[in-house]
Image (tube, rainbow, N blue to C red):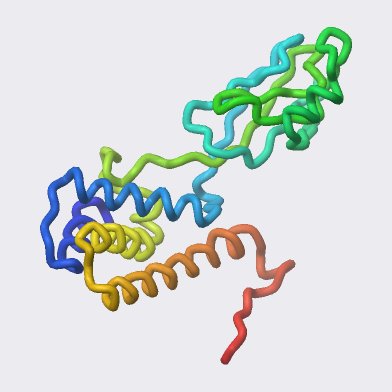
Amino acid sequence: MNYTQLKTAIESYVENNFDSTDINLFITQAEQRIFNTVQIANLRKNVTGSLSADNQYLTLPDDWLDTFSLAVLDSSSNYSYLVNKDVNFVREAYPVVASNKGLPQYYALFDDTTLILGPTPDSNYTMELHYYYYPESITTASSGTSWLGDNFDSVLLYGSILEAYIFMKGEPDVMAEYQKRYDAALAMLKQLAEYKNRNDSYRAGQGRRAVV
């Protein structure tokens, strides 16, 4: 489902026409709710960069939302995954930057754009960061498409309809039905993203649900 199809469907379901500002807000609010409810493995990024000797800070990408993993590669290209801690742990464990140097073992969120590392790198290292981010909204994508629209349009549709119907102050019984359909679509997305995409049937078996 592309943007035009999504817009038409929302207006058809709620029997109302909206200006582009309102309908784009409904869609982006739905996208944000979905991305913060389900950990979608397909919507992770990874980047490589450099850690500088004597610099205990690492600047995060502009679109960083949350860290999945952070690894440092030593001179032999061996991966060493850092452990996430609080800033106070790093400060207390490595209080003197000049004398507490080595291959970093820990990281902490220092502020909204920076990580702090401990110990401070004693050399220049390559790092590899896997992270979650907000993908471009279907409302602004030049192609008019998105991963959700292409692969799981039901959850995007019902999420957007809910936002539109709340805006309209719609009838509670109809709202409850839209909520039920959204919840069902969200459950299917979670089954895909948080079970099927993270396991295989050979080792983990197939997912089962209790039959009532």
Left or right: residue 56 versus residue 130 is right
Q: Quadrant of the C terminus?
A: bottom right
Q: Nearer the viewer, residue 60 or 46?
A: 60
Q: Is residue 113 above or below residue 7?
A: above
Q: Give the mark count.
A: 0
Residue at the image point whose x is 43% and y is 53% from the top: 33
Residue 43 coordinates in the image, percent (x, y): 50, 46
Q: Residue furthest bottom?
A: 212
Q: Residue at x 39, y 74 (%)?
A: 180
- 39 versus 212 height, above or below: above
Q: Residue at x 72, y 68 (%)?
A: 204
Of all residues, the one furthest to the right in this rendering is: 99
Tell me what residue is drawn at x 42 percent, y 41 percent: 135
In this rendering, position of residue 108 left or right of residue 211:
right
Image location of residue 174, percent across then percent down:
26, 75
Q: Nearer the viewer, residue 107 or 111?
A: 111
Residue 162 in the figure: left or right of residue 35? left
Query: x, y (%) of residue 196?
Result: 59, 64
Residue 211 vs 22, above or below: the answer is below
Residue 84 placed where, x, y %? 74, 37
Q: Nearer the viewer, residue 23 or 137?
A: 23
Q: Quadrant of the N terminus?
A: bottom left
